Image (tube, rainbow, N blue to C red):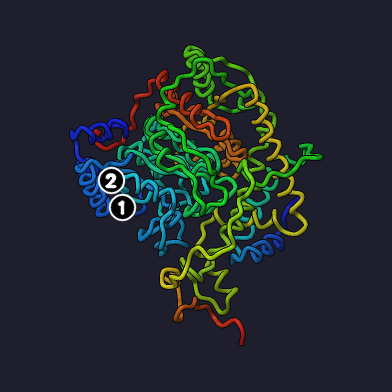
Amino acid sequence: MLDMSIAEALAALAAKKISAVELTDAHISAVEALNPRLNAFITITADQARAQARAADAARAVGNAPALSGIPIAMKDLFCTEGVRTTAGSKILEPFIPPYESTVSARLKAAGAVMLGKANLDEFAMGSSNITSAYGAVENPWQRDDGAKLVPGGSSGGSAAAVAARMAMGATGTDTGGSIRQPASFTGIAGIKPTYGRCSRFGIVAFASSLDQAGPMARTVEDCAILLGAMSGFDERDSTSADRPVPDFRAACARGVQGLRIGIPREYRVDGMAPEIETLWQSGIDWLKRAGAEIIDVSLPHTKYGLPVYYIVAPAEASSNLARYDGVRFGARVDGADLIDLYERTRAAGFGAEVKRRIMIGTYVLSAGYYDAYYLRAQKVRALMLRDFNEAFATVDAILTPTAPSAAFAIGEKMDDPVTMYLNDVFTVPSNLAGVPAMSVPAGLDARGLPLGLQVIGRHFDEETVFAVSATLERAAGFTAMPAVRAGASS
Amino acid sequence: MSLDPATVRRIAKLARIRLADDEVPRLEGELNAILGYVEQLSEVNVDGVQPLSGGAQMAMRLREDAVTDGNYPDKILANAPDRIGNFFAVPKVVE
């Protein structure tokens, strides 16, 4: 039961072969067995999950089962959930119990999904390894030949680990610079960052508002399509929410790529990329060609500036967004002699090192005298990156790249300085800056047995083509490898 | 451009984050590494380019300037670290 896809489970539920209670109980057992080791969940909501499962079975019995009725999922602990503690992976929100529900989690709830708990993440979604969480690192369920503990990627590392280890059938993630796609690649699952504006940001703890976008993570492309269909849609409470119809993403998975033009951006061949990734990229090109696509070389000339732009824009927005954590209205407080003292002590104690670093960089690049040189210039280069994509999409329907420049690394590796860690996001950041949709598909293993993903980037609001290309890659890759640590595996 | 310890302290003050003395040299190194890395943006020709502030491919919507929500002080105050009646409480600001 734990190895089923969401699509298979929905069919089994509809045929009354399994019940939502059975499915949920099996996943709760998996969470209880594996979470002490993997630390994928910060909060487990087993009782609520069982109640939701019973309600799903009751609804189905009277012929009223919505799209995700009875499907157990993990919710990244960045989505506010009414009455359930929401920490954003930070000490400063340790006592925070939201009095309201995020739009995305509310939509999933309304669609009948069962929430197993709140998934671990990098603090305020700032990180590429899940090691910055105040609630401890997450372990990647995949193992390398040397037995070292690996990171699951980040920031949606708990979501990725939970789905890969069969603790949840799917999960929500958020992606500001690659936080859905890079952990998906590191854990051998699929994940899509939809177009900016597709999913409401209302009730998601804000990191960098012009880049943040919610999306699903699951073990198949089709499962991501099913989840995204339930998560998407216009919301007047998010001023950047797109008021446009939600297409049938699931149907798009079956379209194929016959006649599609696929762009290969030459700037994504970077120095130091693992040779296996280069080879896998070529395999992806061959698979799409064989399926009837036309391969076209394209240029995205400002690609190399993506990370430097990101490391100005994202901290700038974060420094503004995180100003609200002042110890006055919600969250943790450290008392002080006066108000300023209270603010400074609260924020010193409540934020971790990476968050402080980014708030300070953001404060600096927005400060008087430096705004034009850093922030304004970064916004102009950002405009050039959007132009790059628009020009490429005048000749191609989608773009194929690797998701990340390496496979999962060990806890402790790549941690000498912040900039080395930031390089993980070199292939994922440009689509956040341009607002275009992008998906990671598990496509192969490296020489040490670790999963690697390919990334498909599409036009604004053309997730359907992204799903069509991704599902074609998935079928051709035939990725069936499973992580060593997973529910149901003998160990 | 390189930050000195005094600037690191000034930024921390602006960001309302108390720094211990031994944190300053570490942050100075890390912040300078990040600023050194983003320095490469100065080689891009941005003459005549309009800055892009967001990912949304649309104009911002306007709505009626009217009250649409509210009137539940207990919900709002439920997470307050300290409250007096229907107010958030903080240390005395004015003597």
Q: How many labels does the image show?
A: 2
Give the alpha-carbon distance from disc 2 to disc 1, as whole Å.
8 Å
At mark 2, the secondary structure is helix
- Reply above or below: A370 against A250: below
Task: Say left or right for A51 vs A445.
Answer: left
Q: Position of residue A122 (x, y in %)?
A: 47, 49
- Reply above or below: A91 against A429: below
Query: In which quadrant of the rendered image does the N terminus of chain A lie?
Result: top left
Chain on which label 2 sits: A
Q: Where is residue A138 in the image (x, y as percent from the top left)?
A: 40, 45
Q: Name the residue under label 1.
A: A44
State the residue lying farthest toward the right: B47
Q: Name the residue under label 2.
A: A31
Q: What residue type is labelled 2?
A: Val
- Reply above or below: A6 against A243: above
Specify the quadrant of the image occupied by residue B23. Answer: bottom right
Residue drawn at (45%, 60%) of the image? A91
Q: Position of residue A86 (x, y in %)?
A: 41, 57
Along the line of sight, which residue is nearer the eye, A296 or A148? A296
